[in-house]
């Protein structure tokens, strides 16, 4: 009898241990189930924010293309499909894991400040005008996406698929047009004032002075023409010849600073990724000029000091230590991070375990530490709600994760006459944190939050590939997806769909998705000194995770993307 009771008890214990916790999941958009955001496949997987881009990536892989080839084709497709989020007028970051070499490289094609830029460029009549860094010609940093994709192809593709074939599907897409979807319609409305200021932007997105609405067809013939030049000439199709001249002319006529010298500047894109362990896994992520990787690793290091998997995802102590860890790493982000070619960053120290231990010791388990008491400096927070991320695994087991952006919706709001190129407003990211490390200098890259990330297990096998848009919230989205998978043993779908919190030190508030925290937890967190605020986040995690022998792809149900594999 006793032994029967004992075995029942052991069974129950094993069951509880192996069960993923009851995470609170977001509702899928109407007309879709949560399951429709997930795909399972043995060999290869593509996850993006738009179905057509996912399909283009999968078709490249099916033709024998590599993850790199698919990533290039997907990037061009997203340039057409998400003119509000990313594109050839912008830039981004990528991690490429080469299975055969067992090596990951970080690829940095972040835009940089024009050589004529200066710290005082946004001061007009003695006063700083922050609008100038957000809208119009002065906000444009030098676009790097095409250079990045070209270099990536030259160095990392096995060239089984010719370059023009990777651009072709996007040329067809731009020419045939596609139906305007809710997010695009909403972004046009939100940026209609700045889009109306430029003829080419107005013609495209507000024809007859009316914003395109859901269901209208967006045809981008000029963009198709530009992509044809890129297909034929690669790098030279964008940075030299007609297209380059048109960019410089449009920007300068509208009062901007970009010159042909800026466009012709050659910048190496390969850099070393950041690497650190977390709970025995190896996390590989993006180094500066993105703050995403450093801040993510610093936070994970601190959290390793607390038994959060035992406490559970919604225990007030778990939310409290997550918040306190984020507070401390975001303060360091504001203090130290910028373009490493211009500022000395104590990088090794920031991602070191012993540094995190000291920071973790400063966390009072019962009380919130006001940001003010840790950071005497007034630092300006910045929000950004655009951007896109995709994750790809190919048949050989190579992986690409890439986050690409033009910053705000439609970047600067400027479309270059005759080219269909939407120019970024990445200069605005110099105000992301108001520190000297991230101050404008000619040729300098503005700080970013983008955090394409790969995770390997103890045996060195790739187990996760992920990233997200969402400005500083990228960091909290990637963080919580990792915690959900690793500490709380959630399924890939639950790990992405689970509601999230956000804290970035400035403002000193604990943001949470509606319905995530019950009254008791909220009350306890409030009593610890946290200022709670419900938020409506722009994050869209694209995750691929290994489950037994399958790749499981999940496109965040907060959006309308898809995962597809074979
Ligand atoms: N410009 C922002 C950055 O680089 C874009 C990120 C986002 O909007 O998600 O961090």
Image: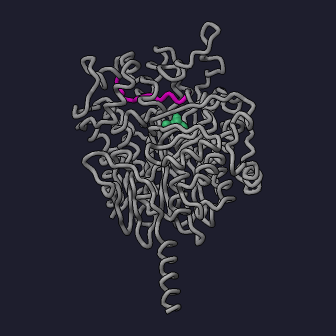
The one nearer the camera, 508 or 122, is: 508
Quadrant in the picture for residue 329: top right
Quadrant in the picture for residue 222: top left
Q: Looking at the image, which residue is at 73% across and 57% down?
A: 353
Left or right of residue 234, residue 349 in this image: right
Task: Locate residue 528, reporting x and y percent.
Answer: 64, 44
Q: Residue furthest top?
A: 125
Task: Locate residue 167, reporting x and y percent.
Answer: 35, 44
Left or right of residue 496, residue 473 in this image: right
Q: Looking at the image, which residue is at 39% across and 24% down?
A: 191
Q: How many numbered marks are there?
A: 0
Task: Locate residue 105, reporting x and y percent.
Answer: 58, 54
- The span picked out in magenta is 418-427
Q: Looking at the image, which residue is at 40% across and 26% down?
A: 242
Left or right of residue 455, residue 339 in this image: right
Is residue 272 among the parts visible in the rendering? Answer: no
Left or right of residue 92, residue 87 in this image: left
- Please say which color scheme the image uses: one colour
The chief SS type of the magenta part is: loop
The one nearer the camera, 381 or 341, is: 381
Q: Is residue 426 magenta?
A: yes
Q: Is residue 331 magenta?
A: no
Is residue 70 among the parts visible in the rendering? Answer: yes
Relative to 461, residue 469 above or below:
above
The one nearer the camera, 427 or 246, is: 427
Task: Locate residue 374, reporting x and y percent.
Answer: 74, 38
Q: Looking at the image, which residue is at 46% across and 15% down?
A: 254
Relative to 250, residue 395 above or below:
below
Quadrant for the C terminus, please: bottom left
The one nearer the camera, 159 or 92, is: 92
């Amino acid at each position: 009898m006793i032994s029967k009771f004992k075995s029942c008890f052991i069974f129950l214990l094993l069951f509880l241990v192996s069960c993923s916790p009851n995470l609170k999941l977001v509702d899928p958009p109407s007309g879709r189930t949560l399951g429709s955001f997930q795909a399972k496949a043995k060999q290869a997987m593509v996850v993006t924010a738009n179905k057509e881009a996912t399909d283009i990536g999968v078709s490249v892989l099916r033709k024998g293309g590599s993850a790199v080839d698919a990533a290039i084709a997907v990037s061009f497709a997203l340039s057409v499909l998400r003119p509000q989020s990313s594109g050839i007028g912008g830039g981004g970051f990528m991690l490429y894991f080469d299975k055969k070499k067992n090596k990951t490289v970080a690829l940095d094609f972040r835009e940089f400040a024009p050589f004529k830029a200066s710290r005082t460029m946004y001061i007009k009549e003695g006063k700083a005008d922050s609008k100038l860094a957000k809208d119009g010609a002065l906000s444009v940093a030098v676009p790097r996406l095409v250079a990045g994709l070209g270099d990536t192809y030259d160095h990392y593709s096995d060239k089984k698929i010719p370059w023009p074939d990777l651009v072709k599907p996007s040329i067809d897409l731009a020419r045939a047009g596609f139906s305007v979807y809710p997010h695009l319609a909403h972004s046009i409305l939100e940026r209609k004032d700045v889009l109306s200021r430029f003829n080419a932007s107005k013609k495209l997105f507000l024809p007859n002075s009316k914003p395109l609405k859901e269901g209208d067809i967006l045809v981008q013939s000029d963009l198709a023409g530009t992509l044809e030049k890129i297909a034929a000439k690669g790098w030279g199709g964008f940075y030299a010849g007609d297209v380059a001249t048109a960019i410089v002319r449009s920007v300068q006529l509208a009062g901007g600073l970009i010159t042909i010298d800026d466009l012709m500047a050659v910048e190496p894109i390969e850099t070393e990724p950041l690497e650190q362990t977390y709970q025995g896994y190896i996390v590989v992520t993006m180094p500066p000029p993105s703050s995403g990787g450093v801040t993510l690793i610093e936070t994970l290091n601190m959290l390793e000091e607390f038994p959060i998997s035992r406490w559970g995802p919604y225990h007030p102590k778990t939310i409290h230590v997550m918040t306190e860890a984020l507070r401390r790493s975001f303060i360091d982000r504001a203090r130290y991070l910028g373009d490493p070619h211009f500022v000395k960053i104590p990088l090794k120290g920031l991602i070191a375990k012993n540094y995190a231990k000291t920071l973790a010791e400063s966390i009072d388990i019962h009380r919130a530490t006001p940001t003010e008491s840790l950071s005497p400096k007034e630092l300006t927070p910045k929000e950004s709600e655009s951007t896109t991320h995709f994750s790809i695994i190919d048949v050989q087991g190579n992986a690409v994760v890439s986050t690409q952006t033009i910053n705000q919706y439609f970047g600067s709001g400027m479309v270059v006459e005759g080219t269909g190129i939407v120019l970024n407003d990445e200069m605005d990211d110099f105000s992301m944190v108001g520190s000297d490390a991230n101050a404008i200098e000619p040729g300098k890259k503005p700080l970013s939050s983008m955090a394409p990330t790969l995770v390997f297990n103890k045996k060195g096998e790739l187990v996760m590939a992920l990233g997200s848009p969402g400005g500083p919230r990228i960091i909290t989205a990637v963080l919580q997806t990792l915690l959900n998978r690793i500490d709380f043993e959630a399924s890939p779908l639950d790990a992405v769909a689970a509601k999230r919190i956000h804290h970035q030190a400035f403002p000193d508030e604990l943001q949470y998705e509606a319905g995530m925290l019950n009254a008791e937890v909220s009350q306890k967190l409030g009593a610890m000194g946290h200022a709670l605020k419900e938020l409506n986040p722009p994050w869209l995690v694209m995750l691929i995770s290994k489950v037994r022998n399958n790749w499981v792809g999940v496109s965040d149900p907060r959006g309308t993307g898809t995962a597809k594999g074979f």
